[in-house]
Image: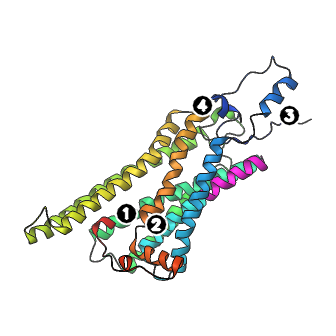
Amino acid sequence: MSAEPAATPSWLSPDPTAWASGGGGPTDNASVPAEESLAPRQLPLLVNPWDIVLCTSGTLIACENALVVLVIWQNPALRAPMFLLIGSLALADLLAGLGLVLHFTCAYLLQSDSAQLLTVGLVVASFSASVFSLLAITIDRYLSLYYALTYNSERTAAFTYTMLVLLWGLSLCLGLLPVTGVNCLAEEATCSVVRPLTKNNVAVLSVSFLLLFGLMLQLYVQICKIVMRHAHQIALQHHFLASSPHYVTTRKGVSTLAIILGTFAACWMPFTVYSLIADYTYPPLYTYATLVPATYNSVINPVIYAFRNQEIQKALWLVCCGCVPASVAQRARTPSDV
């Protein structure tokens, strides 16, 4: 009879029933006979409701971003660097959604450590690519404003392709770490709040996120300064600063940037901070409560970056009903679309 422990469906705790009791650490059942201890513990091991929430989020993420990827892929007009970066973001979120669904399926059907490592690696690589794509979009927007007259060139396309290769290559490396041995399956004490990722692995991911967030914050501050300076110059020419339509729309654009950055921070910051201070002994409830909002960022991304874009709106209308409403076709692009 093999002494190897059976794989557990929960990817956040070695104890699959911990979600029901709120405990996160191992329990001592030495004084209880095996027949009496095993049977009751298998009763609540039907489906973790938090895993159902994650699977549902993954399904919504996959469907929503698949639509964006399909529209950009089929429309030859959407080949500009900006749309390539939006497509990269949608593809990363699509793979993240599929990763959540596959993990749920493999965990409760296969219950294999190998499948667990592959699906967790896919989720890590996909969410990493999503965050890196957000940074690339921010860089693209900053450069398009800073070099407004010369940015749209072949050099811009080459720079965009370089960013895409780097972000996907780095994301792939991060996703392969659990598969190549950087995991805690052999030593449970090294586990982080997300099993089978190690504490050091999650710490690196969390610190990297904080650095990327700081860089995005700095770039968005510079974008706001550039946009406001341009709006101020134009408004002074019309001698009506407060009532200038361009000034009003520019203020909307700055508000949009604040919403973008605020949404990103609200979704990812709780899980990032919690991952740095907690380990596998903490109750899984806390991990789920911070991880689920992080997945919502991939639900919101298409709304912010794709569905608000005029060209993508036209393509969506053509795909859905074969026509473009006049309100969409004639809407002028404003600074609030930044």
Q: Is residue 35 above or below residue 99?
A: above
Q: Which sits in the foreground, 169 or 100?
A: 100
Disc on the earlier residue, 3 or 4: 3
The residue sitting at the right extreme is 1
Quarter-of-image position of residue 149 = bottom left
Q: Is residue 133 above or below residue 334?
A: above
Q: What is the number of the mark on residue 283?
A: 4
Residue shown at 54%/55% (left/top)? 127
CA separation, marks 1 and 4? 38 Å
State the residue position of label 3.
3
Mark closer to the chain start, 2 or 4: 2
The CA distance from mark 3 to mark 4 is 27 Å
Q: Nearer the viewer, mark 2 or mark 4?
A: 4
Residue 94: x and y in percent read 58, 62
Q: Is residue 110 magenta?
A: yes
How many circles with numbers are drawn on the protein? 4
> Would residue 241 be found to the left or right of residue 20 on screen?
left
Q: Is residue 167 visible?
A: yes
